[in-house]
Image (cartoon, rainbow, N blue to C red):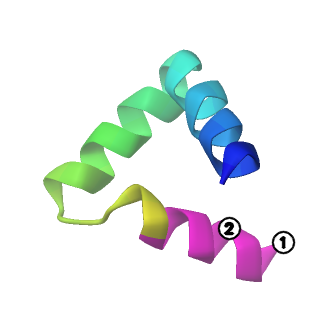
Amino acid sequence: NELKEQLKLKLEEDEFSSEQLQKLKDKGITFTQLWHKKLYSA
């Protein structure tokens, strides 16, 4: 999914988001789970 990849790159480029994503990964939460969470909460 190109849009998903672009969003992922945008998040990774953002320092705060990268830090948050890393914390989530440390807790075992994947980007896909985060993606669905954002998708359904939007």
> What residue is drawn where x is 61% and y is 41%?
5
Q: Which residue is mark 2?
A: 38
Q: Is residue 15 magenta?
A: no
Q: Quadrant of residue 42?
A: bottom right
The furthest residue to the bottom: 40
Q: Main secondary structure of the magenta part?
A: helix
Q: Position of residue 33 (x, y in %)?
A: 45, 72
> What residue is drawn where x is 52% and y is 33%?
17
Which residue is more in the foreground, 5 or 11?
5
Q: Is residue 39 magenta?
A: yes
Relative to residue 40, is residue 2 depicted above or below? above
Cα–Cα gap, marks 1 and 2: 6 Å
Tell me whether the residue at label 1 lies in contact with that at label 2, contact meaning CB atoms closer than 8 angstroms.
Answer: yes
Q: Is residue 37 left or right of residue 30?
A: right
Residue type at mark 2 is: Lys
> What residue is drawn where x is 70% and y is 44%?
2
Q: Is residue 5 left or right of residue 30?
A: right
The furthest residue to the right: 42
Circle 1: element type: loop
The mark found on residue 27 in the picture is: none
Q: Which residue is mark 1?
A: 42
Circle 2: element type: helix
Mark 2 Cα-neighbour bin, 10 Å: few <14, some 14–19, many ≥20: few
Instruction: Quadrant for the N terminus, please.
Output: bottom right
The furthest residue to the front: 1
Q: Position of residue 22 (x, y in %)?
A: 29, 39
How many marks the image carries: the answer is 2
Mark 1 Cα-neighbour bin, 10 Å: few <14, some 14–19, many ≥20: few
Magenta residues span: 33-42
Q: Is residue 21 left or right of residue 6?
A: left
Q: Position of residue 20 (x, y in %)?
A: 41, 41
Which residue is more in the foreground, 39 or 24?
39
